[in-house]
Image (cartoon, rainbow, N blue to C red):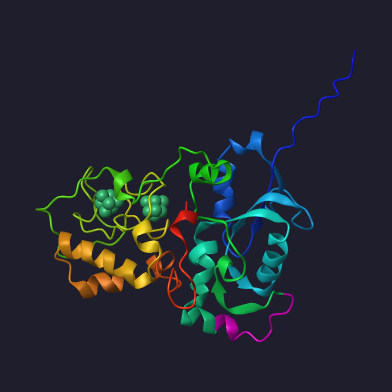
Amino acid sequence: MKKDTRKTPELPRFAVLQLSGCAGCEVSLLNASEWVERFNLVYMPLVVTAYNVPEVDVLLISGGVRNDEDLYNLRRAVKSAKKVIAVGTCAISGGVANLGNRDEVRKLFMAQSERRHLPRLLPKSQPVDAFVEVDCYLPGCPPTPELFMAALLNPPDFKTSKVVCQECGRKKLKDMRPKHLLGFQQGKVLPDICLINQGYLCLGTSTRGGCRALCTRPGHPCVGCRGPSDMLIEKDSQAWLQSIQRVFEAMTDIPPEELREALLSPQLALFLFQFSDYAGGDRPPRPKEKVL
Ligand code: SF4
Ligand code: SF4
């Protein structure tokens, strides 16, 4: 039999560099399946080991820059990548690793004089674009498998909704004004009615869409993991805070101090306002065209 000498076209190569984070992004990526036939995954410590990140067409970076090892690996990896995508809250705006920036936690860590064999902590956690150029941002904690596919395959017709509310389907009512916030774990959630009307701290009005309102449709308030919407992403984090406050003023009778305290609580600090520099300060705004 004649030997088939046709060459199989080479698949684009991609790698996943994991910095300080929780590996939730990697799990979500593994829950997507379309890329398996269309990409060649060459590096991802969770499933594919290699000494270094080899040359790749696309480099996904998850996790924040928390220690000197993160920084070393990041700088080295981007040199061999044609396209760099920052994925997940940790790489873009903080996430779990960034909780260590809170004063009380930082003191605890920095007080340890004996940290042998461990990477040296940087004074504070930083997003990857504080050190390297990023071509595309994919926010979410974690981004859904569908969003991962959109980031990798870049389909021309893919478009996310502007804010989570557009994907949620719950109705906002004028005559249902709560006087206080309910805790996340409290109460029975009425179907079809906006969670703000029911006294929950839902941030869907100003959070960028694309997750298909994964949390709010079954009744969990949106905590803003997809980050600020296009309207707000090029502004500083105060603008995001004020936008949420205005919504609650318009829809509820919750005292502003109660709302502000809840917005700055550690639970939400995981996602919101972690860097006072979504834009402003010493960091240029992230262009909305680059954010998926
Ligand atoms: S529940 Fe949240 S996401 Fe849904 S409509 Fe209300 S504010 Fe928007
Ligand atoms: S509803 Fe909000 S918290 Fe939930 S996945 Fe979407 S953006 Fe993230």
Residue 17 visible to an observer of this rendering: yes
Residue 41 part of the magenta-drawn span? no
- At x 56%, y 59%, the residue is 22
Q: Dividing the image into 4 quarters, which one contains the N terminus?
A: top right
Image side of residue 163 versus residue 286, left or right: left
Q: What span is in magenta?
A: 108-117
- At x 57%, y 71%, the residue is 130
Where is residue 93 shown, x and y percent of the image? 48, 66
Where is residue 70 shown, x and y percent of the image? 66, 68
Where is residue 235 shown, x and y percent of the image? 37, 68
Q: Outermost residue toward the left?
A: 175
Q: Is residue 110 above or below residue 79?
A: below
Q: Which of the two residues, 110 or 85, is positioned nearer the viewer here?
A: 85
Where is residue 150 shown, x and y percent of the image? 52, 43
Image side of residue 268 versus residue 81, left or right: left
- At x 58%, y 37%, the residue is 33
Q: Is residue 277 above or below residue 88?
A: below
**Prevalent SS, magenta region:** loop
Residue 141 visible to an observer of this rendering: no
Find residue 35 and report its image quarter.
top right
Q: Which of the two residues, 54 or 174, is positioned nearer the viewer here?
A: 54
